[in-house]
Image (spheres, grey):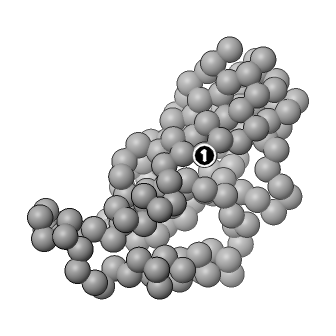
Amino acid sequence: MVVTKRISLQTKGECDIVDITPQVAQQLAETDIRNGTVTLFISGSTAGISTIEFESGLVSDFEGMWERNVPRNIPYAHDNRWGDGNGYSHVRASLLGASLVVPFTDKRLTVGTWQQIIVVDFDNRPRSRQIIVQIMGE
């Protein structure tokens, strides 16, 4: 069986990190599927999905890592072409990735004790985001 749902978010941009674990667990709870996988996919090219220990120190470290590795204050050809100043956000999002697969057993996500599912919005402005949640299993 396959069930497709959506999670809608309002983000702040500028490396806004949002824990969506509770929403994913709720989407799973609303199905009749007990065992399988949840595939998460974010629409858009300036945000990504991953897992992290969602605590303030690590969130700060994660944000700092992006600034060190893909700084916003250097020239990007995308900005020259479109003038929107978010070339760095496209590069960051492509490195993080737009999808994640999480297995579940007995209707429980198999994430670790200190592991949460996150959306990271790298864009340079607030955005409305849609995460497609596809639940597959038996």
Q: In terms of depth relative to the viewer, which is nearer, 52 or 55?
A: 52
Residue 132, compared with residue 16, is above or below; it is above
Rendered residue at 55%/64% (across/down): 17
User: Label 1 sits on what residue type?
Assistant: Leu
Rendered residue at 86%/58% (across/down): 113
Q: In terms of depth relative to the viewer, which is nearer, 13 or 91?
A: 91
Image-quadrant location for residue 105: top right
**In this picture, residue 47 sits left or right of residue 28:** left
Q: For the image shown, how many numbered marks are present on the structure?
A: 1
Q: Visible in this render: residue 95?
A: yes
Residue 109: x, y in percent?
A: 79, 41
Rendered residue at 76%/28% (across/down): 36
Q: Secondary structure at mark 1?
A: strand
Query: Where does the C terminus fall, quadrant-wise?
Result: top right
Q: Visible in this render: residue 11?
A: no
**In this picture, residue 42 sits left or right of residue 107:** left
